[in-house]
């Protein structure tokens, strides 16, 4: 690997915390990292380079993220456009989720602008047209990108490639977005994202306009600075287009319309690109990029690291050059301790993890770790039996011979027989009364129409015999810093810290969070209908949901420790100029909707 190119950030050497292998893909170099995880260079068995994105461990530990990640990967695999990097492999169930896409030997728009400055107008027109075509395919698969920005668009010699489409949605409803893990870039959000509105295809169009401004001027359309200030400008102010070439203005202005329904469609964007280029057809020539940028891509193509050799292949060591012989890495298994007992004459051997998806990296110059090494970021498991594991065979239990029973006299036997007869008589009377009472209960149940299960322990006894009548609270204004208790009628905000649901905000509607200390929260998918049945059955529990991830109409199920069930219908946040920061929601409550064993 060229040290100059490595220093330039093209291909970074693996560090001590980087994996050596991801589910059979041997890692050759690190390509970069972001809020979702790290990206590595690997190869298919046929030698084609691929980019492997390994999701951060914090997300891997979140069940809601895994659920959504799996859904988004399935959708992303249907996207096969000319200007997208297709998803060719993935695993959402392994120790660490990952996905593999086709490797694109080119920089991101962000990196290209940082190194070469703003791009010429002709290049920007080709860039916007290519991204628009990519979005047509992505939206056609039912996906909204949600995080289109300069670092998610790669530049290749034959056009742009859009990456990471749909993956940001996997993190939208996880508790991690409330704990400092930023998903999405405020400078490239749409007004409806910043205000907690409904996200759709038009959201990506707004982001496309911002990417165009950044590529042509080298600066975001709404400036830089603290995220809350940028988001406020996106919602309430006009963009700064002073550095934009005149031929790009009509295109960008149509993309950056505040109202989603009034923005340009992707078809209109392509027509505007053709008109600005003064051509009936957009001809993407090989020299669509500036010469310096194109030369860098050519250089990168010539130095892509080759596939990593399989374990067991000869590996040069520093000793061959007269240097010290390296010691085994810390994570390598120690030798088998002497004297350990064996089973059936076979020494105990460490077993491979159930899913050896990711393997820890070796130190430079050390042969590859065998496949049975512990999984990357997986908890350590001792491969050897614990001290004292061997136990001598347990002797047969000793049962002493019982002494002979004492002799009983005849009068005691007679009295015992009389007493037993009385017990049987009383028991029979009780049983008869129970049968009569049960028959009366059955008749009463039949006459009232009740379907309550008889007896206990069955699945039907896990909830009340009849569904409770729902209590509705439409148009409820939930103030920030307050809590609600579903048992209240009417629903009333409290300043207690131990109620069923709270709304926490950092002084504005940006950065608000619905949360609870004990209530189980579930953000329903768009395909799930909010109802008592749904809220009883869903189990993707969390304790925090970021408001900025919610669109209007989003539904949240609540299951409290006291057995109440709630459904929150999110309708939006208060206006920026409102002195009271609050959420507007419709609340439905089924009090006693869960039996004690369901809580």
Image (cartoon, rainbow, N blue to C red):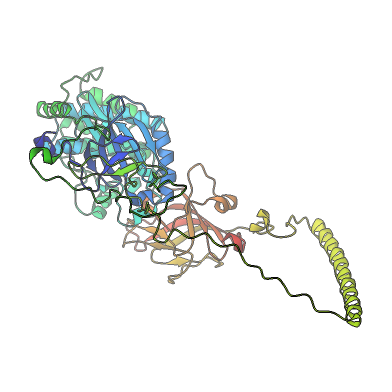
**414 over 55 or under it: above or below:** below
In which quadrant will I find the C terminus?
bottom right
Looking at the image, can residue 263 be seen? Answer: no
Q: How many marks?
A: 0
**577 over 268 or under it: above or below:** below
Residue 421 in which image quadrant:
bottom right
Where's residue 520, x and y in %? 49, 58
Residue 504 in which image quadrant:
bottom left
Q: Is residue 544 left or right of residue 452?
A: left
Q: Nearer the viewer, residue 348 or 169?
A: 348
Q: Nearer the viewer, residue 166 or 575?
A: 166
Where's residue 194, x and y in %? 32, 49
Where's residue 526, x and y in %? 48, 43
Q: Is residue 418 left or right of residue 210?
A: right
Q: Nearer the viewer, residue 521 or 298?
A: 298
Quick one: which residue is furthest to the top in this view? 280
The residue lying at 7 percent from left, 41 percent from top is: 322
**556 over 78 or under it: above or below:** below
Where's residue 242, x and y in %? 15, 40
Residue 163 in which image quadrant:
top left
Q: Is residue 340 left or right of residue 282?
A: right
In which quadrant will I find the N terminus?
top left
Looking at the image, can residue 171 be seen? Answer: yes
The residue lying at 28 percent from left, 42 percent from top is: 369
Q: Nearer the viewer, residue 429 or 301?
A: 429
């Amino acid at each position: 690997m060229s040290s100059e190119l490595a220093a330039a950030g093209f291909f970074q050497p693996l560090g001590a915390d980087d994996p050596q292998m991801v589910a059979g893909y041997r890692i050759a170099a690190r390509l970069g990292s972001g809020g979702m995880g790290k990206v590595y260079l690997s190869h298919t068995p046929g030698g084609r380079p691929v980019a492997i994105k390994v999701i951060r461990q914090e997300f891997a530990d979140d069940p809601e993220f895994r659920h959504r990640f799996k859904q988004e990967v399935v959708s992303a695999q249907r996207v096969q456009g000319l200007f997208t990097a297709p998803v060719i492999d993935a695993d959402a169930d392994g120790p660490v989720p990952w996905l593999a896409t086709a490797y694109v030997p080119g920089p991101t728009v962000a990196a290209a602008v940082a190194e070469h400055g703003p791009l010429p107008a002709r290049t920007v027109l080709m860039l916007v047209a290519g991204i628009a075509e990519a979005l047509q395919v992505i939206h056609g698969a039912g996906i909204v990108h949600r995080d289109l920005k300069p670092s998610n668009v790669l530049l290749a010699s034959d056009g742009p490639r859009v990456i990471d489409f749909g993956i940001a949605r996997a993190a939208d409803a996880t508790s991690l977005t409330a704990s400092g893990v930023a998903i999405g870039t405020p400078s490239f959000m749409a007004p409806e994202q910043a205000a907690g509105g409904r996200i759709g295809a038009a959201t990506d169009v707004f982001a496309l306009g911002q990417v165009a401004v950044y590529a042509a001027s080298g600066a975001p359309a709404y400036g830089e600075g603290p995220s809350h200030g940028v988001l406020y400008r996106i919602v309430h102010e006009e963009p700064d287009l002073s550095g934009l070439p005149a031929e790009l203005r009509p295109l960008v202005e149509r993309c950056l319309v505040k109202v989603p329904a009034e923005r340009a469609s992707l078809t209109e964007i392509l027509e505007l690109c053709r008109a600005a280029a003064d051509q009936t057809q957009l001809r993407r020539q090989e020299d669509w990029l500036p010469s310096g940028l194109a030369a860098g891509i050519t250089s990168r193509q010539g130095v892509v690291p080759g596939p990593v050799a399989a374990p067991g292949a000869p590996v040069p060591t520093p000793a061959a050059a007269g240097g010290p012989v390296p010691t085994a890495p810390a994570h390598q298994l120690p030798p088998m301790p002497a004297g350990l007992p064996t089973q059936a004459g076979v020494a105990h051997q460490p077993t491979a993890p159930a899913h050896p998806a990711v393997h820890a990296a070796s130190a430079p110059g050390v042969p590859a770790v065998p496949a049975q090494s512990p999984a990357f970021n997986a908890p350590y498991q001792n491969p050897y039996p614990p001290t004292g594991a061997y136990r001598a065979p347990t002797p047969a239990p000793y049962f002493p011979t019982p002494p002979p029973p004492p002799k009983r006299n005849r009068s005691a036997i007679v009295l015992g027989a009389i007493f037993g007869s009385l017990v049987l008589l009383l028991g029979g009377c009780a049983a008869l009364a129970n049968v009569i009472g049960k028959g009366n209960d059955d008749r009463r149940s039949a006459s009232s129409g009740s379907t309550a299960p008889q007896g206990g322990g069955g699945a039907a006894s896990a909830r009340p015999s009849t569904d409770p009548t729902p209590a509705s609270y439409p148009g409820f204004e939930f103030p920030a810093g307050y809590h609600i208790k579903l048992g209240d009628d009417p629903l009333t905000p409290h300043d207690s810290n131990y109620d069923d649901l709270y709304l926490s905000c950092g002084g504005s509607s940006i950065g608000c969070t619905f949360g609870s200390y004990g209530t189980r929260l579930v953000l329903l998918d768009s395909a799930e209908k909010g109802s008592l049945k749904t809220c009883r059955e869903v189990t993707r529990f969390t304790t925090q949901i970021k408001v900025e991830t919610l669109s209007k109409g989003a539904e949240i199920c609540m299951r409290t420790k006291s057995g109440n069930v709630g459904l929150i219908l999110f309708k939006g946040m208060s206006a920026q100029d409102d002195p009271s920061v609050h959420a507007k929601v419709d609340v439905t409550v089924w009090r006693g909707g869960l039996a004690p064993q369901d809580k």
